[in-house]
Structure formats: C-alpha cells, structure tokens
Amino acid sequence: MESWSLFTLYRRILFSAVSVYVLIRVSLFLWNWVVASANDSREIHVLRRYLVTLIMRSRLRRFWFDLLQIGVLVILLGTLLRMH
Amino acid sequence: MPPDASTSPSLSELPLDELIRYGQSLGISLSEDTPKGEALRKVRARQELLLDLDRDALLDVVMWLRIPVRRSAGKEQLAELIAQQNLSDFRGLSDRGLEVLSNLWNVVPRAGESRSDLESRMRRSRGPIAQWRRLRRKVVGSVVARIVASGEETRGDYHFLPEDAPSSIRRDIEEDGLMGSVAKRIRGVADDYVHEKLDEIERRIDAKLDEIDQRLGEWRDREVAHRLNILKLTLVFSILVVLLSLLYDYLRA
C-alpha cells in the first residue's frame, strides 16, 4: 500500500487531469472528423478517400530522428517509473 | 513545343512553375526556387543543345532503352523520353548514343577520352546517393530475378510505333465527294485544334493538381513533425516530473 503524501496527491491529481484532458481532446478531434466526413455527397466521398491516401502516403522514414528521440525518451521514462 | 527559335517568346511568357516543369521534362535539374531568368537561360541552352545533337543518335538511345516511339519522333520528344530514365549501365549503347547521352547529362566528352572513362564520369555525375540506390536495386533485382525468373531473358528486335497514315485527297473525294471531303478536312483540322487545346488544358490542370498534392503532402509532413515535437516536449516534461518525484522520495527517505 502506497503511503500518502503531498507529492503522491499531486501526482495522482496531475495524472487524472492530464488523462481526462487528453481523452476529451482526442475524442473531440475524432468526433469533428467523423462529423465533417459523414456527408455522403460525392465531393466529400472523394475528399475522404484522398485524405486516406494522403495519410497512407506519408513515410515514417522522413521522421526517423524524431521517432528515435521519442523512443529513447519513452525508454527513459519507463526506466525512471520503474525506479519508484 | 518544338525546340526552335520561334518558341522563345512563348517560353518567356510561361509561368515559372510550368517553365521549371518543362525544363525538368527535358532533363535539366531545376529546383522549385530557381529564379525565372536562370530557368529560362537553362531551358534555352538545352533547346540549343538539342538543335546541335544528332537525331539518329538520340534515336539510338531510345531504341537501346527499348522505349516505343515513332521513327519520325522529334528531338525534344526523344530527349524527354531519355530524361525520364535512370541509367548507369551503358552496355549495348552505340558510341554516338553514349555521346549524346553524356551531352544531355552535361558531361562533355573530352578529346581522346576512352568509352569506359566517359561512362565512369557519367556515373559519377549522378552523385553517390544515386549510385548507392542503383547498387541496392541491382542486388535486390538479381535476388528477385533468381527467385522468380525462369531462365535467361531474351530481347527481340526493336520495332517503331506505326506512323500516322496521311490521307489521300483523291481517295477522300472519291469517297465523300468534293464538298464532303473539304468539309471533312476542315472539320478534321478544327478537331485537331480543339483536341490539342483540350490536351493543353488537361496538362495544365494535371500540373496544378500535382502542385496542390505536393503542397498538401508538405503540409501533412509539417503537421506530423509538429505533433511529434509536442509529443517530445510532453515526454521531456513527464521525465522532469518523474525525476522531481524521485528526488522527493529520496529526500523523504
């Protein structure tokens, strides 16, 4: 059982607030796209397919350095969390 | 557009993006931010070079590449077809073909230079990245060919595309009468003009769509890079908080 302290309280509140915030923002983002592309007119249909193609044509190789940095940061964060 | 002096005024009236695209189709390396004056100068220099090059030698290259083309194809069309190819192996190409190819690649043959020296200079002119890419594809190609291909590939004789057959006035009058054949010819000329204009409009629309597509691709990449930066910042911040937490635990202990 984790002993309660001021910092533990801070961590819990921060974790909850950030999680809720991220959940709301991501849900809103996805919902906006669903609403925008729900129209069944031909233009929207073509645009939707084009957007999917545009996304699929992106190459992760272009962002290899950023992804490498993110990977290192995630490993670092995981290691530090395990040290608690 | 034929490579003669009469096109020069219309060439200078072309918008920069179309001029650059036209220059690139002729095999000139032009970036999007090339100033108009420089692009114009390079395109005109390429047109002058095409005037000096031997058409038969250009045909040699196209036949060696086994690109289907009419025997009557113009120098500019041949140069465009050659410019689309990524070459590094010149085996089987005639000497005059190699010479015009080197001129198109801006590798001027030196007096008394051997063929192998010219070939290696041409390969070097493409840059180390292109050479590396070619080598990689060669290895992959040989592996795949070993797995898939069943035996030696044979190359048949090269055949030109059929020419447009010119119609005979006598035959047209025989078939349609005098007025009918004249009307048919006028209609044919008008149709050709309309088709040419429609093709030109279609080419311009295609070019604009390509440009829009390219800009949207750039916007997508910028957006992804931006999101990744935000993610990195979030991770850095989280690591700082975790470090602070560790320090707090350590001090408390």
Image (cartoon, coloured by chain):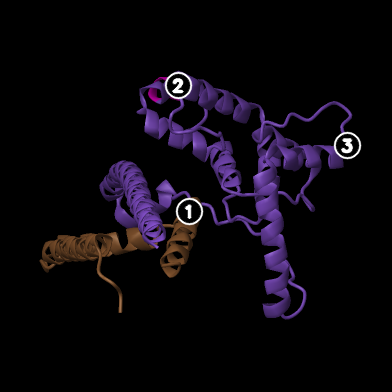
> Circle 3 is placed at which residue position?
B114
Please give the chain letter of the residue carrying mark 3: B
Q: Are marks 3 and 2 on the same chain?
A: yes
Depth-wise, is mark 3 or mark 2 nearer the camera?
Answer: 3
Identify the amino acid type marked 2: Ser
Chain at numbered mark 2: B
> Gap in Å between the C-alphas at discs 1 and 2?
52 Å
Vertical comparison of B239 with B115: above or below: below
Give left or right: position of A30 versus B232.
left
Residue marked by disc 2 = B8
Q: Which residues are magenta?
A: B6-10
Residue B78 falls inside the magenta stretch: no
Of residues B174 and B117, which is closer to you in this image?
Answer: B117
Q: Position of residue A72 (x, y in %)?
A: 49, 58
Q: Which mark is residue A69?
A: 1
Chain assigned brown: A
| Closer to us: A61 or B144 | A61
The answer to which image quadrant residue B158 occupies is bottom right
Q: Within 10 angstroms of label 1, few (less than 14), some, or many (20 or more) residues?
A: some
Spatial CA span between label 1 and label 3:
50 Å
Tell me which residue sits at (66%, 27%) in the image: B52
Name the chief secondary structure element in magenta: helix
